[in-house]
Image (cartoon, grey):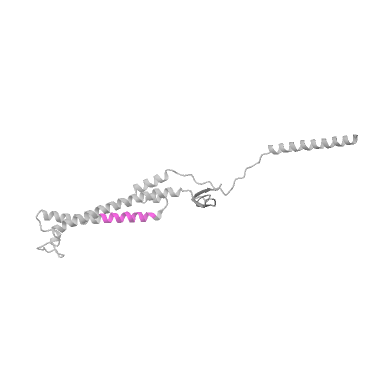
Amino acid sequence: MIPNKILLTGILVCIISFASFAQNKKKNDKKELPKEVAIDPIIEVSEPINPLSPAKAAFFSAILPGLGQAYNKKYWKIPIVYGAIGTGVYFYIDNNKEYNRYRDAYKSRLAGFTNDEFYLDSQGNQLTTPRVTTEKLEDAQKFYRRNKEISLLVTLGLYALNIIDANVDAHLLQYNVDENLSLAPHYKFNEFDATSNLGLTLNFKF
């Protein structure tokens, strides 16, 4: 009996010793902290967004057409801007010139003169009857005045389009095109009621 008691006492002491050692080791493991934190090198910090950039681009294009495109570094658009606006200005000037030409002849006719340019032939000789009648002079004035107004509206529209283009470009230059962002269509078939669901899924990868 005594050897059995000694054996049981020894086993009990061993168990208590192992339990104490395990608890101390567990506490020490909890107290240890990592010396450094590793950062994933794949994640890149994007450039800060400038909320005033679109307004600046639009303001520059309003002052001088094409200047907003230069601010956005879209230099290839500058010749297109000047070509479009220049074409509108050319047609406005040409129609205004023709309108004034027929108007001056019409005023001369109303004053009783017969020496306007349409009373002369190609060599400058006086004609008995004009090449363009007074009624045709009125029609020509209406035609070129309408074309002049259309040319002016088109030119103003191209000028406004130049401002809008610079503003939109400035917005798109700051648009987030990170590969971690994705927008994809989502389709799911419900097997229980035989219906389908269609939508969009926005995913963001950390």
Asked which quadrant contains residue 93, the reply is bottom left
Q: Is residue 25 left or right of residue 83?
A: right
Magenta stretch containing residue 110, yes or no? no
**Of helix, strand and loop, which mostly describes the magenta segment?**
helix
* The N terminus sits in image quarter: top right
Instruction: Say above or below: 197 vs 8.
Output: below
Q: Is residue 189 left or right of residue 94?
A: right
Instruction: Say above or below: 67 vs 125.
Output: above
Instruction: Say above or below: 13 vs 193.
Output: above
Q: Residue at x 75, y 38 (%)?
A: 22
Q: At which x and y percent is residue 158?
A: 33, 52
Viewer-closest of 7 and 1: 1
Q: Residue at x 23, y 54 (%)?
A: 146
Magenta stretch in the rendered image: 77-92
Q: Residue at x 13, y 60 (%)?
A: 133
Q: At which x and y percent is residue 92?
A: 26, 54
